[in-house]
Amino acid sequence: MKIEGLYELYVTHGLVDTDTRNIRKNTLFFALKGENFNGNKFAEEAITKGASFAIIDEAEYKTSDRIILVDDVLGALQELANYHRNQLQVPIIALTGSNGKTTTKELINAVLSTKYKTTATKGNLNNHIGVPLTLLSMNKSTEIGIVEMGANHAKEIEFLSEIANPDYGYITNFGSAHLEGFGSLDGVVKAKSELYDFLKAHNKKVFVNPNDEKQVARTNGIETITFEKSIKFTEANPFVRLSYKNTDVLSNLIGAYNFANISAAITIGNYFNVSLEQIKNAIENYVPSNNRSQVINTDTNRVILDAYNANPTSMKAALESFSKLNASHKTIILGDMFELGIYSSKEHQSIVREVEKNDFDVVFLIGENFYNTISRTNKIIKFRSFNDLEEYLQNNSITDSTLLVKGSRGMALERVVELC
C-alpha cells in the first residue's frame, strides 16, 4: 500500500498502536519487530481486540483484508509520521542534548500549554519509534508540537530531524553521555549538532543559552533566539529560585543545573507570547516525577532522588550543586554509569576524585565500575551490588541526613528510598 492510502486510513481512525497489551478501539496496529519479539504474530490478536487494521511485513500473517502487508513496518510508521507532519500547519519545537532533555521538554510543555493546545513527547519516547508516535499523536487541535530526540550513535538526530521537520530547535548541552556509541566528547558534539545542521539547511530557528560557549559557537549562521536577559539565578537550596522580569519564581526542581532548563522554558514561552503570570504559574506548579530531581521526605531523612539516569557530566553537576546545599549532614549514594565504553574506568575514577574534594559525611558507591576505583578517604564505602548496600544499611541505618541518590537507570537506585 502506498503512503497516501495508509494516510487515508490513519486520518479516518486517528490512532496508532504498537503493543497489543494496550490496544485501543479502531486503532491502526503496526506490527513492529525487535530482538525478542515479532509483532507480525500478534496481527490477528490486534484485530480481535478492536484494531481496525494491522500493518505487517511478513506475508504469512496476512490472513484477512484488514491486515495490510508492507515492505517494512517500521519504515512505514516513520514515513507515515513524516507525511502527517508535513500536513500539519503548526510549529514544531525539537530538542536534544546530553542532559536534561526530558525535564526541559516537560517544562516547555507546561509553559506553552497555559496558552496553547500542545502535543509533546510522552516520557522519554524519543527514539526512532517514539518520535514517529509523538508526531502521529498530533491532530487538528494541536497548536504547537514539542518533540524530544534522543540518540546514542551518530546520524540518529539527523534521521529524526528529517522525520519531524522541526521549525525550532534547542540543545540543552553537550556532555559525556553515551561515549560508547559516540566514541568521544567530540563525537557527542558532532552528533547532537545534527539538529543544528538540519535547522540551518532549512532556514529554521534555534533557542540558545548565551552562557554556553559551545552552543553559541555551533549555532553560528543560524537565526537564534537567546535566553531572556531578565532571567536571574537566585539560589538552589535545594529548589531553584530565580527572578524573571523582577518577579520571584520558586520552582520544584533541585540543583543549580536545572536553572538553564527553566530558563529555556521561560524564553520559549516568552517567544510565543505566554504572559508573565502564566509562565510563573507553570514553572511553580511543575512537579518532577519518575525519579528525576525529586525531593522525598522519609521518616528520618530527606532524599534528593535523581536516579533516572546518569553520565559523568550530570553526575558532576549534581555533586557540585549538592555540595553547596545548606544541610548539616550530607550522604551520597552513587551508582555505576553505563554506556561509557573504553572511558568507563577513567570517568568513574574522575567522579571519585570529585567526591573527595567535598566534605560529605559519608559516600556509598555501588556497582562493579565504582567498586574498582581507588579512593583516598575512609568516608567512601564501596559495594559491588545493590544487595550488598541493602544488607549494610539494614545494620547501619542512616538518620537525620540529606541524601543525594544518583546513578544510571540500570542501577534502579530509587530502591534506596525504602531503606532510608
Image (cartoon, helix red, strand yellow):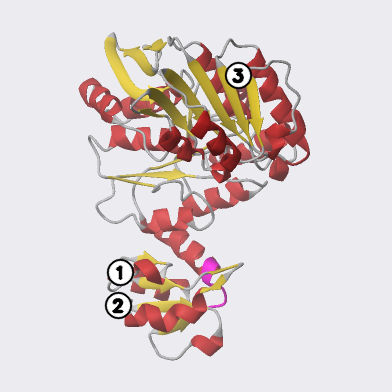
Q: How many marks?
A: 3
Quadrant hosting residue 280: top left
Q: Is residue 92 above or below residue 306?
A: below
Above or below for 377 versus 117: above
Which residue carries the number 1 mark?
24
Camera-nearest label, 2 or 3: 2
* The furthest residue to the right: 342
Disc 3 secondary structure class: helix
Please state which of residues 71 and 233 is positioned toward the viewer in this rendering. 233
What element does badge 2 sit on?
A: loop
In reply to whether residue 7 is colored magenta, the answer given is: no
Measured from the top left, where is residue 207 in percent x and y? Answer: 46, 28
> Looking at the image, do the residues carrying marks 2 and 1 touch, with CB atoms under 8 Å apart?
yes
| Nearer to the camera, 106 or 333 | 333
Image quadrant in which you'd find residue 222: top right
Residue extent of the magenta highlight: 69-74
Residue 70 magenta-highlighted: yes
CB-based contact (under 8 Å), mark 2 and mark 3: no
Q: Secondary structure at mark 1?
A: loop
The kind of residue tagged 1 is Arg
Residue labelled with disc 2:
50
Q: Identify the residue position indicated by label 3 in the image.
A: 213
- Residue 64 relative to residue 38: left or right: left
Indicate left or right for 34 with 26 as reference. right
Splitting the image into 4 quarters, where does residue 192 fall? top right
Name the N-terminal-most of marks 2 and 1: 1
Q: Which mark is residue 106?
A: none
Q: Amino acid at mark 2?
A: Gly
